Image (cartoon, rainbow, N blue to C red):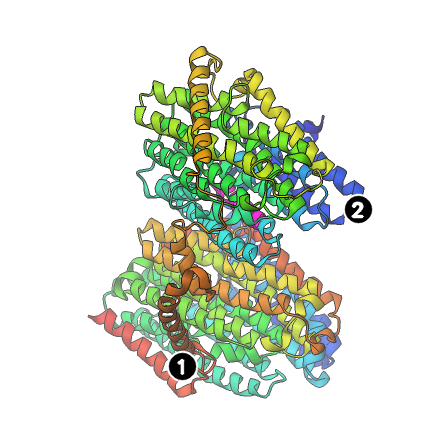
Amino acid sequence: MIAEILGDVSPGLILILGALAVPFLPGKLRTAWMLALPVLAFIQVLGLDHGLHGALSVFDLELTTLRVDRLSLIFGYIFLIATFLGVLYGIHVGGWMEHTAGLIYAGSALGAVFAGDLMTLFLFWEGTAIASVFLIWASRTERALAAGTRYLVVQVGSGVLLLAGTIIHYGQTGSIAFDSLELESTAGLLIFIAFGIKCAFPFLHNWLQDAYPEATVTGTVMLSAFTTKLAVYSLARGFAGTEILVPIGAAMTAFPIFYAVIENDLRRVLAYSLNNQLGFMVVGIGIGTDLAVSGAAAHAFCHILYKALLFMSMGAVLFRTGTVKGSELGGLYKTMPWTTGFCIVGAASISAFPLFSGFVSKSLILSAALKGEYYWTWLVLLFASAGVFHHSGIKIPFFAFFAHDSGRRPREAPLNMLLAMGIAAALCIGIGVFPGPLYAILPYDVTYHAYTLEHVVTQLQLLVLSALAFTVLMRTGIYPPELRSTNLDSDWLWRGLGRILAAHFDDRTTQAWARVAARYWHALERFIATLYRHHGPEGILARNWPTGSMAIWTTILLAAYMILAYV
Amino acid sequence: MIGENLPALQVILPLFGAIIAALVRRGDIAWLVTLVTGVATLMVAFALLVKVLAGGPISYEIGDWVPPIGIEYRVDVINAYVLVLVSVIAAVILPYARTSIALEIREERRAWFYTMYLLCLCGLTGITITGDAFNAFVFLEVSSLSTYTMIALGRDRRALIAAYQYLIMGTIGATFYVIGVGLLLVMTGTLNLVDLSTRLVEVESTRTVSAALAFIVVGISLKLALFPLHVWLPNAYAYAPSVATVFLAATATKVAVYLLLRFLFSVFGAHFAFGQLVLTPMLLLLSVAAMFGASIVAAFQNNLKRMLAYSSVAQIGYVTLGIALATATGLTGGIVHLFNHAITKAALFLVLGIVFYCAATVRVEDLAGLGRRLPVTMAGFVVAGLSLIGVPGTAGFISKWYLVAAALEKGWWWLAVLVVASSLIAVIYVGRVVEVLWFRAPTETVAAVRDPPTVMVATAWLMVAATVYFGIDTNLTAGVASLAADSLLQGPQ
């Protein structure tokens, strides 16, 4: 019935329009309204028929605001589940800004997934960028403000590339339909880079580790679910089977591991492991077979759940103790047993323990890599799997809840957080034990059995050896100790440049930069001064010219035309 | 009966309205006369557009003298479109005009202002509708002379100098135009535009015709404020009464652009005009110079009216850019930008008129925190500002989309980049104002400003809403513009 009333409205718009009412609703009603919105949208999505709906004519472009097929549906389902969990997890937060921004963000991501053309995709794409930055700024710290601004610049930049690609694509083909794209054309390349930025490809990834850990407790949970997975969806839609994605994805799985191992901020560790998990999906899309793309979609589905669960558990720790630095935590299991339990479920899922959700989705991609004879890639993925277990599976719960006792005795997380974590944990285990329903909604029909002897044994061997390595390293004291430190990643390049422009100098890291910057800054100042001299209120271009000199200009122009016409 | 005489009514209505307004001498009654005339003119313009879209071009013989001897009024898609634009702006701002004029002009002069307003409307519609080159000159003078008077009625003493300067420059422009027309008359013996286009073919290769084209292009360029012939414009816009600024910014330069289009494409023909006069590189160069030079000047201006005036010069650059490309998409972009820029700039100047009404200043440093004092009005400035920048979902985006598409069609990547880059300067000058208006704490004087009259805010928001509406539904704007572009490119008929 609801589906009939809402008709062909994009489910994203339900969330966005619903979000606009949030500031005007009083306490209890607001809570109920916000929880009802994703449920309402979910019911609508369930009632949608496959095909193209919601055609809209905007100047000479035919927009398709609602494309329903199996690929968009699986992402639609999980985005709505994540929205519900995110809202529930953050329901205790006062004020309306975060709630509104979160719902608009989720709605934009949802709208983008159901977009049938590049223009609609672009509009929602920018929507996610603009709405989500408020989740970072809502931390109201100096660092968050700066990180949020950098994040916004990168995200809007990605949108501009997408728009440029769309215009060129339209110019060349006369169509804006969002289907399979060619990497060889300029348009395709621009769109590919736009997707790549949002998907945090290597060297384009720094915004993620930069911004996500600075967002609010609840904001990070939302952020971890949508932006990058929207990019994964877009890649799956536009660039499935693009060979270059395989090495890109493989690199993405491997390199964040080293950073994650030495990082102290546990939410930043999770941000690195997010990058690593995205790598698996990108590899799947790059291989491009039915099995691989389905694996990528399934992995995105499971990943959103367990990554949100891990971020929620770390958020709960941050909420109760005010820090997520590994060096300052430890022994929390005594007073936060539920959070500890849920965190372990999330850790087991991301590590792909059999009977947890990560196992049933990751093995799809690994099998696809083997079937497609990508042996090197397969080995890298295997190494990455061990690494994931290492930093997300063991390090996160170990340093936060066990390790040396920090003496902190925080209270258990609030009820709404526990409920949200509980539901996510239940889903993680549920999917792990009964993968059937998940396999049924995959983009392609695949018959796959996750629980064969071979799969289980391979995975268990990997996990056991990885755990062994961790234990040995810890015992012998070789394991990198949790230190208060800042990792230098490739982002120092553009962050340094950004600092020059903003004239913000961080003593600790940019003393050398300051001198170089000063020179550029002077050049910039000189440039603006020159501009001002010519264009400022007293400049030649803005001054009140005497009438005579205007007349001379008229004559000059006439003479120029005449000369050009005669020669 | 009325249906047949619509083209004449289009011009005669405002002319008679002006005479009545001058005779009644009372500001309020003159306003009422203007309102009735303005609405009637608008209805005539709409009727003409509907008729033209349904039945093709209309030819009307003034006094039943058969063209080319008599004067012909000729309405096709493009001038019907410009007529609607001019009449809509003229009518819609009238409710607003009453309050604004009551503040800015002394009682005994108000009736004169409305007289000049209607005369200017008469001149502008006349230029647009006539099919006769000399008749166009006459209407050009009618509109110009009334414009000088309107500007001079401004409260600021600098308004007099601005009006005087515009008078000199406008006269030079009109003289150039009439010299060009005179040369054409000598060569062809006719003034009728359709007739001209057929007879010109034989004498095309003569130097006289080239000179005529150069004179006409430069003369009209001055009227449409093509960079660097724009210098009269900022002062004229800045010191004229607020209503006059809105009206002129939205219509006067647009009609001049129409006249240029008419001569380049319908009379001389694109092939000759762009082949003989090497117009494309010249116009491109000047357009790009306008887009950047004027935008940067705007970014440094402290007087908001001057800032928007310079931004107008920059926006005209986008229009002439579309003309310079001389392709279907480029022309569509230029013509649609005529309309979109007219409503966007009208909305912005309307808001500034309210600011002046409430705060008695439009200097940016005096307006810190005004957004918090007048949130509804100033939100209008932000939305219209977004359209000026060309943000998706607003009218400004549509024009830029076509221009970028046209540049890419020709394979001129650099031009597409320049269009986008110059839009970024608009981000700077709009953003600077938004920052001052919204993010600074209100000063004491700002906190004490009076409330704006509802009718002014409503008018401004009507225009602001239009910038959003025409960013989404473009059947009227881009649809008609592309029809007009096609008919222009078919050349002389």
Residue A123 belongs to the span the image colors magenta:
yes
Which quadrant of the figure contains the C terminus of chain A? bottom left
Q: Which residues are magenta?
A: A116-133
In the rendered view, would you say B257 is above or below A230? below
Between residue A452 and residue A112, name the one nearer to us.
A452
Left-right relation of B374 to B135: right
Q: Quadrant of residue B43?
A: bottom right
Q: Quadrant of residue B394?
A: bottom right
Left-right relation of B163 to B112: left
For disc 1, the chain is A
- The residue at which mark 1 appears reads as A540
For disc 2, the chain is A
Neighbor class of circle 1 (other Cα within 10 Å; few <14, some 14-19, many 20+) is some
Left-right relation of A473 to A185: right
- The residue at which mark 2 appears reads as A26
Secondary structure predominantly adopted by residues drawn in magenta? helix
Between residue B131 and residue A72, name the one nearer to us.
A72
Mark 1: which amino acid? Answer: Ile
Dots 2, 1 in contact, CB < 8 A: no
